[in-house]
Structures are given as C-alpha cells and as structure tokens.
Amino acid sequence: MQLTIWGAARTVTGSMHLLEIDGQRILLDCGLFQGSRQLTYERNLTFPFDPRSIDVVILSHAHIDHSGNLPNLVKQGFAGSVWCTPATRDLCVAMLQDSGHIQEQDASYVNKKRTRQGLPPIEPLYTRRDAVQAVRKFVSIDYGRDFTVAPGVSASFHDAGHILGSASVVLSITEGTQQRRLVFSGDVGRHGMAILRDPEVISEADFLIMESTYGNRRHESREQAQQVLRRVINETHRHHGKVIIPAFAVGRTQELVYALQQLTISQKIPDLSMYVDSPLAVNVTEVFRSHPECYDAEMMELIEQRNDPFGFRKMNYVRDVEDSKALNFLRDSAVIISASGMCESGRILHHLKNNIEEPDNTILFSGFQAENTLGRRILDGNRRVRIFGEEYDVRAKVERIEGYSAHADCDELVAWARHFDPKRLQHIFLVHGELDSAEALSNLLYREGFAQVDIPERGQVFTL
C-alpha cells in the first residue's frame, strides 16, 4: 500500500491524498488550492496523476478546499463514484455550482486583461455545468455504515463535528494475509460548539492522516467569542459604523447567525439590522434546515420549541444583486456577513471596497486566513490592499475572533488523537496545516508517545 500526499501539504488548502492498494487507486478528497492567482490556476488545472486512473473518491466534507476540484477531475475523465455523507452531497450541490460560477467570472476577468495585452483567452477551470456533472458521481451513505470501496477495502464515515455532514474516514484494508486500518481525520471539529455534535471518538488505527490547522494555537471558548462579538458590535454601533464579517458560507455563517440571535434575544446588543449577503450562504442555510440528524442536543431542543435557529426578526438574507448593492447606501449601523471567508471572491469584496476606508467601520475576521489571500493581508496589518485591481487604504478597525473556529485547536487535536493506542498506531501524517502549526502539533504528539510523526511535503510517497 502506498500513500502520496498531493494536497494540503504544509498548507491548509487543496486537500488531496492518493492511496494505491493492490492496483486500486483511491483519492481522499479533491480540494481546490488557494494562493497567488497564477499558481492557483496552474495547480488546480493540472493533476499530478491521470484522473482517468482514479477508481474512487472518498470525500470528507463539502468545504471547497476539500471538494472544490471534483468538477475538474470529472471533466478530465474520472468515471468512478464519489462517496460522502448525505449532508455533504446536498451542500456540494450548491457549493460546486457556486464555485463553477466563480471560475467562469474569474476567467472572464482575466481574459479582459489578456485581450488588452494581445494574449489568447484562458478557459475557466470548470463551469457550473461541469459541477452538475460531478454531482452525478456522488453516492451518499450515513455515518457508521460500512461500504465497499474496492476489493479488500471497506470504509465508514464518523462524525467529525466540523461542519454539517463532515466526516472522519476509517478504511479497513486487507492485502494478502494482512489486515490494516487507516484513518483520515478530515477536519476535526470542536467540543461544546453550537448546532453540531462533538467529534466522534475513533480508537483503532495503524496509520493516521491528521489535520493540523491550529496545531500551535488555543482558541477562545464559545463564551469568550460571544463576548468579543458583543463588544465589537456595541463599539462600532456607538460610532454609527458597520461591522463587516467575511465568513465561509458553510458552517461559519450559520454559527454567527445563531450567536447573533442569542445576543439579540438577551438584549446584549443594540436593535440593529443584520444581513447575510451571499446567495450561497442562503442556499446552504436551507440545507442546514434539512439535516437535523447532524444537530446536537441544544439545537434539537430549539427545533422542538419551534424556534428557527437561523432566522429571526432582524436577520435579512440577501439573494438579489440589486438588494446587495443597496447595502452600500445604508446610513445606519448594521452587521453584514458575506462570503468568501478569505476575501478572495464573492460579494464580500464589494463590501470591503465600500467600507474599508471608513474608520468608524470594523472588519471582523472569524476564520482562518491562508497565506497570500486578501483576508490574510488585511489581518496582518497591511495599510493598503488591492481590491478589484485598485488600491485602498485600510482605515477601518480590524478585529479577530477565534472562538467560532470550526477547527479543533492544539489541545483538542491532541485530545482527539489520544484515543489511539501509540503501540498500535505506526505512523501519523500531519497535513492541512502550515509548517509551524504542524511542527508544534508533532511535538505535542511525540510527548503523548506517538513515535513516528511526519509532516509530508507535496508529492511525498510513503510505503505503508
């Protein structure tokens, strides 16, 4: 059995890992890489293997850095099945089409420049139509049910508690007389968060591919996050400003809406208008309503009381472009949540363009910002940033809130890994984390008695 790490190697984007077992080729995730524009296009366009040679894909969850290059994989000849949970499939229906639309827009934008430079046009990475073709390959199965991936290989999904439908993958592998168990953590969620259940404990593995996003950091608690959110809204409201929150359409937006509902009900923030300005987030919220099987006890209690956790009097969901443009002319204080979470595309760019130079406003980051993204540049303190090709001064206050992160922090990652037996677990591969985070987590795992922990480079091959 061979494992090749092709994505999310010493970075947090483009999750993709190839398993080769007795001639069968199994791909764990097929995510989009995000970074500088040219590298992003080239990396995502060209697979490091022939897509036609892949027999099956197992998808941990719907986030675009895990699922977003599936339409391109299918477009280039992949003909197998994509296994995932039911909620992941439903999220991907919306998210991959939205991603295809963004690819078309990006290609159109780049081609305008290329035309002026006398260069030939480029094709979009994939289109909305390609995304629909990809979804036809999806086969969904619920948590805890075994399914056959390939001869001698069975798998099951276990709730990762990260976003709706997210899963850790357990692979039971028979090669000749040997039986081994490989676990892919996917993205591990947090304990005690709203809406979703806690990450499920897995205790048996010979090999573990594990995320390390926050391997060097500790998060605020949910209560501390609520206090920060309350403070930022109240302070900005006193200055008659707006709070602009870049947020991922899946998970983070719904978590923030729930938190804002609780603050509004308890009268801890002013009576001001709030907007979710992202067609994708609106669609995704409807998917959330359709999957109560993923909810925790707190959320189920709200549902039983006939309270809608994603809709209350002051929350407005914006689909129409004209309604979105109208937000530019708001005179009163407001909270605007918009995608994308790393400020690389979507309507958030318009809200930043129109509000980032006003010192009474606040840009509130609620999630991880990868290297070379606009969100990271703003968060790192750059005083001038480029939006839609034009330079803007960053005069708005910039704040950060980490307690709503859907990723486990270093303590939570170690606690999750601690359930494995160090005597049985032969090898841990740390992925989905920048190098400093992965190194910090590696040291923590060594202290727990795990002797073999690697931080693979992209394309590194391991024989298991």
Image (tube, rainbow, N blue to C red):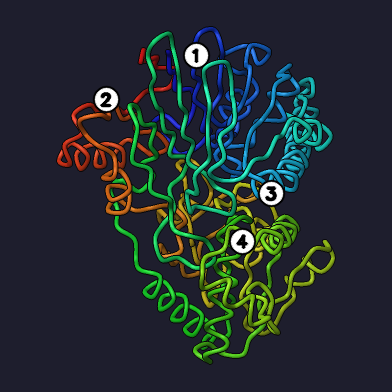
Helix, strand or loop at label 3? It is helix
Image coords of residue 41 (percent x, y): 63, 28
Reply above or below: 463 against 327.
Answer: above
Q: How many marks?
A: 4
Mark 3 vs mark 1, foreground winner is 1
First in sequence: mark 1 vs mark 2: 1
User: Mark 1 = which residue?
Assistant: 20
Q: Residue at x 70, y 35 (%)?
A: 139
Disc 2 target residue: 426
Amino acid type of the residue tagged 3 in the rendering? Leu
Q: Quadrant of the N terminus?
A: top left
Decide: few, some or many residues near mark 2? Use Cα within 10 Å; few <14, some 14-19, many ≥20.
some
Is 212 displayed left or right of 15 in the figure? left
Describe residue 439's horizontal placement relative to residue 325 as left or right.
Answer: left
Q: Amino acid at mark 2?
A: Gln
Disc 3 or 4, which lies upstream in sequence?
3
* The quarter of the displayed image where residue 403 is located: bottom left
Other-residue count near label 4 (Cα within 10 Å), few / some / many at <14 / 14–19 / ≥20: some
Q: Earlier in the sequence, mark 3 or mark 2?
A: 3
Reading the image, the residue beneath label 4 is: 352
CA distance separating discs 1 and 4: 45 Å
- Along the line of sight, which residue is nearer the eye, 383 or 182? 182
Q: Are marks 1 and 2 in contact (CB under 8 Å)?
A: no
| Separation of residues labelled 3 and 2 (CA atoms) | 35 Å
Please state which amino acid type lies under the numbered disc 4: Leu
